[in-house]
Structure formats: structure tokens, C-alpha cells
Amino acid sequence: MKKANCFLYNKQIKDLAKKGESLLEDLPHLPKDWVKNIVKILPYLLLIGGIFSLVSGFQDLFAFGRNRAWIMHWMQIDRTYYYVRAIFSILMAVLYLMAYKIIKNKEYEGWLLLFWTVILTLLEAIVLLIIGGGSLVASIVGAVIGFYLIYEIRPEFIAKETKKTK
């Protein structure tokens, strides 16, 4: 997939990501050495997270044995909940695995993929709330933490992007 022609990296997404920076600029920042360490281990966390997300997605999609049917009936959870979770887990896995090499090279497009994963997580939470699962408080807290962390590491990827364009 060519980066220049991909909808994941278009100008509107880059502008939206830039606007998000102003919302979080007044918050306290992580120490620089923490940010550097996070960026250093991030590719490996993405690889592990991508594999686990893929396994989880396929498990939610295909594992409806007696045990899960009993639990679903007892907790009054519809199969739709698991199908929605499966779709989002598989999409997240694809984004994580796509981002692995790009993040390892500290390219800005990798950061944009992380931006997409946080948006996708928020969208999943909203959809699950609509169909009757999930928690509003947990969704809000998760989104705030996710956006905070990706905007804390953003300067590491912006620095590489500006060097590349000069």
C-alpha cells in the first residue's frame, strides 16, 4: 500500500491530528527519557499487541461453544457484541501490524496509524455502548489516556519528519 495514496495518511487526517495537539498542550508532560524509552519499545509492543488482537478477534468470531453460550445467556449478552468486538479487534491488529515497521523507523505515518488506533478504540467503545455493552466512564478514561500517550510521543516522529523534508 502506497503511503501517499492511502486514505490513512491524507491531508485531512494530518490536519485533524495537528488540531488535537492544541487540546493537550496544557497538560503536564512525561519526562523526555520516558518518552524516548516508550518510543524505543513501542514497535515490539505493537507486534505483541497485534498478534494478541488478531487471536482475540478470531476467538470472538468463531468460539461459540457451550461455555460461552451459557455465559452469554447468564450475562444477557447478544452474539452481536462478540461479532462487533471481533471486527474491531481484527482491524486493530491490522493497524498494529502495519505500524510495526513504520514505528520502528520512527516515521510520522506510523504515528498516524497510532492515531487511527485510538480513534478506532473510541469508535468501538461507542458502538459497544449503543448495543448494550461496555462502560461510558471506562471509554472516556481510555480515550483520554490513549490520546495523551500518543501526543506525548508525537514530537519524536515530528522531528524525524522535519529532518526528512529538509
Image: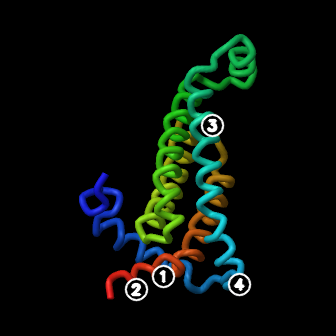
Q: Which residue is mark 3?
A: 133
Which picture quadrant has residue 7?
A: bottom left
Nearer-N-terminus badge (4/3): 4
Nearer-N-terminus badge (4/1): 1
Q: Which mark is residue 31?
A: 4
Q: Which residue is mark 1?
A: 22
Residue at 66% from the left image edge and 65% from the top image edge = 41
Q: Is residue 152 left or right of residue 161?
A: right
Amino acid type at image mark 3: Gly
Nearer-N-terminus badge (4/2): 4
Nearer-N-terminus badge (3/2): 3
Residue at 65% from the left image edge and 25% from the top image edge = 77
Q: Which mark is residue 141?
A: none
Q: Whole-percent x and y of residue 65?
A: 68, 13
Q: CA distance from mark 4 to mark 2?
A: 23 Å
Q: Nearer the viewer, residue 94 or 76?
A: 94
